[in-house]
Image (tube, rainbow, N blue to C red):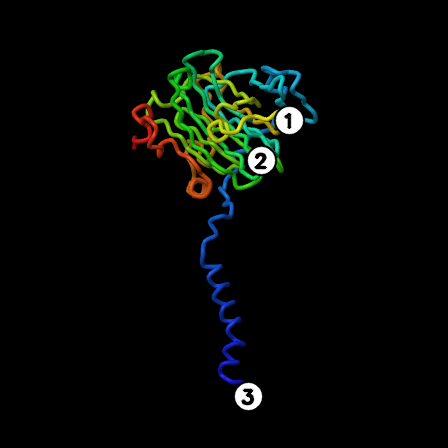
């Protein structure tokens, strides 16, 4: 006959296992990627690079093969591209694969801008990947500039930054900007990560913009505030794009052209499930928010305090 102590020793592992398993299923798995319940990227058809874009600079550092655009940066040059027409609203995206390893100082981007048409008074909406050092994640930076607030001494950044929940160098992932007269929504694999609402004409870009992409050397600020620079012993630095999306109202479209939506509601906004997915991304992966930065002059960013 077993003693009480030996019986306790034998059954204790089973009791502990029961409580561990029970606790596991009771605790919400906040690190798991949620479903946004809606895929705006599937609403808009893919286009080939030459169907909507042209090279802007660095043509010798650009290659298109089988609907995939590759651009690269080396010591001699980077490269950039631009849409063939301007838009006044729309959904703009691409699947992007980033360069692995040491990429400090290197920026890969997809953005909207009218800087060439409106020098020193331009608007801009950015998705930028800030290069990094081995062992540290890429930073995805979103930004909004309004009416010259990104020009010269008037720079007013509205940066919100994220560390992604996957390795953006291992596979292609889809990144997009939804811009309407009422809001800007940034999306990663259809998960909304940031919603920037129009709260006043002074804090929102309303004039037509083109769609751009580029890879370039931003050593002065890109990686940990410029601490780490581009190191060309690792050159070339590649950026790969495919599955381009350009859908919306071109600059000269009739007034009857309706702004597209990134939600099941044609009027825009986000569904409840999309909002929950955005809250997950911001809670678990947002690493910087300009509205929470006490070193910023928030008199020039009144949207941080508007209801």
Q: How many marks?
A: 3
How crowded pointer 2 is (Cα within 10 Å; few <14, some 14-19, many 20+) is rated as many
Depth check, front residue: 67 or 98: 98
Give the CA separation, mark 2 to mark 3.
63 Å
Q: Quadrant of residue 62?
A: top right
Residue 91 position, x and y percent, is 50, 27
Cβ–Cβ below 8 Å for labels 2 and 1?
Answer: no
Task: Pick whichever of labels 1 and 3 is earlier in the sequence.
Answer: 3
Against 153, residue 245 (above or below) is below
Label placed on residue 1: 3
Local SS, label 1:
helix
Instruction: Identify the residue at image location x=63%, y=23%.
Output: 72
Q: What is the quadrant of the C terminus in the image?
A: top left
Q: Which residue is mark 1?
A: 233
Give the residue number, with chain letter if any, for mark 2.
173
Q: Nearer the viewer, residue 295 or 231?
A: 231
Q: Is residue 223 left or right of residue 156?
A: right
Neighbor class of circle 1 (other Cα within 10 Å; few <14, some 14-19, many 20+) is: few
Q: Nearer the viewer, mark 2 or mark 1?
A: 1
């Amino acid at each position: 006959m077993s003693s009480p102590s030996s019986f306790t020793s034998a059954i204790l592992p089973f009791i502990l296992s029961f409580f561990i398993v029970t606790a596991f299923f009771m605790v919400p798995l906040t690190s798991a990627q949620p479903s946004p319940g809606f895929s705006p990227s599937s609403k808009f058809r893919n286009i080939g690079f030459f169907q909507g874009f042209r090279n802007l600079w660095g043509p010798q550092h650009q290659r298109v093969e089988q609907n995939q655009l590759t651009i690269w940066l080396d010591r001699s040059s980077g490269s950039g591209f631009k849409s063939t027409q301007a838009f006044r609203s729309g959904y703009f995206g691409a699947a992007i694969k980033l360069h692995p390893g040491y990429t400090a100082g290197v920026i890969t981007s997809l953005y909207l801008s009218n800087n060439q048409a409106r020098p020193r008074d331009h608007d801009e909406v950015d998705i930028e990947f800030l290069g990094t050092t081995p062992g540290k994640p890429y930073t995805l930076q979103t930004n909004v500039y309004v009416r010259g607030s990104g020009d010269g001494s008037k720079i007013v950044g509205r940066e919100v930054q994220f560390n992604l929940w996957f390795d953006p160098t291992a596979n292609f992932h889809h990144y997009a900007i939804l811009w309407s007269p009422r809001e800007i929504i940034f999306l990663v694999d259809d998960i909304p990560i940031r919603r920037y609402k129009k709260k006043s004409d002074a804090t929102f870009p309303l004039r037509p913009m083109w769609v751009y992409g580029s890879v370039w050397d931003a050593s002065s600020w890109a990686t940990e505030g410029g601490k780490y620079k581009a190191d060309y012993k690792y050159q070339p630095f590649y950026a790969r794009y495919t599955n381009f999306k350009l859908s919306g109202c071109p600059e000269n479209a009739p007034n009857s052209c309706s702004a597209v939506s990134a939600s099941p509601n044609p009027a825009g906004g986000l569904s409840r499930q999309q909002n929950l997915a955005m809250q997950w991304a911001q809670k678990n992966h947002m690493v910087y928010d300009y509205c929470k930065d006490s070193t910023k002059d928030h008199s020039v960013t009144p949207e941080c305090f508007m209801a």
